[in-house]
Amino acid sequence: MRIIYLVGTAGSGKSSLTAAYSEWLKQNEQSVATVNLDPAAAVLPYEPEVDIREYVDYERMMFTYNLGPNAALIASVREVVREIDTLCSEITDLSVDYVLIDTPGQLELFAFRKEGRAIVKALKSIPSILLYLMDPVASHTTRLFASSLFLATSVYLSLNLQSIIAISKIDIAPKRILKRIRRWISSQEALEVDIESRSQGMQMLITRDIVHILHDIGRTFPVIAVSSKTLEGMGELHAAVTRVVNEGEYELR
């Protein structure tokens, strides 16, 4: 069994990729199960084998304790972690080749709070990797791209799992944006030239310095462009997943 955590900002396409990748795996004769960790998910494009919504009622938490939407999400995940042994047993008993874990839309709820790290730690005996979804439309300027790269690295540092970056939704992203992002990923020099030409002052200096550090770190992350709709890049994504798992750099230390 291998676990793949799909993490990214709201709207980056985590649930869609979970559905598409699981179907691709089935078509390629791999057994797969999906896990939903978003207690506020109203509709999912797949039928999860393990569903956090069976452990907690997000709307009930919100109205019972007079909480706002974000506070209710935090309270819901905290409630589930109290039953973490049962949740993780349900996952480990799946007996499949791959488990795709669809994390909450609010990235910080899973990636930067102790509850998310507790789930990852509880499942650390199973080879696990992090698939970070980068939304190309939200990364189309040098500053936004630097921010996305910074966020991907921050999630890696928080969860301490070997990572892959998936540039998502390439079927709807303008080709000029995809070309620009691919150039920035492949060439630090090209990225720094664009930073210096498109920004100025302290913002330019900060962006350039951040990118200078993160680009070297980011080069250790395979970067794959994928589409959940057309399935473009799915073979390359799976090849990257296989390589990362075979390297064995997946355990939480």
Image (cartoon, grey):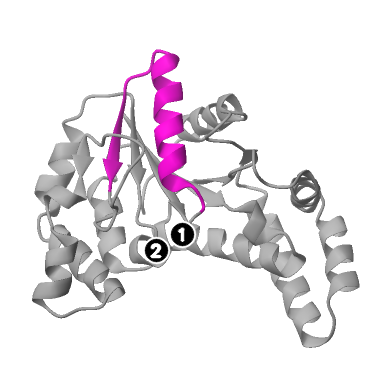
Q: Residue at x 60, y 36 (%)?
A: 226
The span picked out in magenta is 12-36
Q: Residues within 10 Å of mark 2 (few under 14, many from 20)?
A: some
Q: Are marks 2 and 1 in contact (CB under 8 Å)?
A: yes
Residue tagged by mark 1? Answer: 10
Q: Is residue 225 magenta?
A: no
Amino acid found under the numbered disc labelled 1: Ala
Question: At which x and y percent is residue 82?
Answer: 11, 61
Q: Quadrant of residue 150?
A: bottom right
Using the rendered image of the protein, determine whether residue 250 is visible from the camera's viewpoint: no
23 sits to left or right of 154: left
Q: Residue at x 16, y 31 (%)?
A: 93
Q: Secondary structure at mark 1?
A: loop
Using the rendered image of the protein, determine whether residue 193 is visible from the camera's viewpoint: yes
Q: Earlier in the sequence, mark 2 or mark 1?
A: 1
Q: Residues within 10 Å of mark 1 (few under 14, many from 20)?
A: few
Question: At which x and y percent is residue 5?
Answer: 39, 45
Amino acid found under the numbered disc labelled 2: Gln
Q: Residue at x 72, y 70 (%)?
A: 143
Question: At which x and y percent is residue 62?
Answer: 17, 72
Q: Residue at x 63, y 67 (%)?
A: 147
Q: Is residue 27 magenta?
A: yes
Q: Secondary structure at mark 2?
A: loop
Query: Of the numbered discs in the image, which one, if any, rests on residue 74?
Result: none
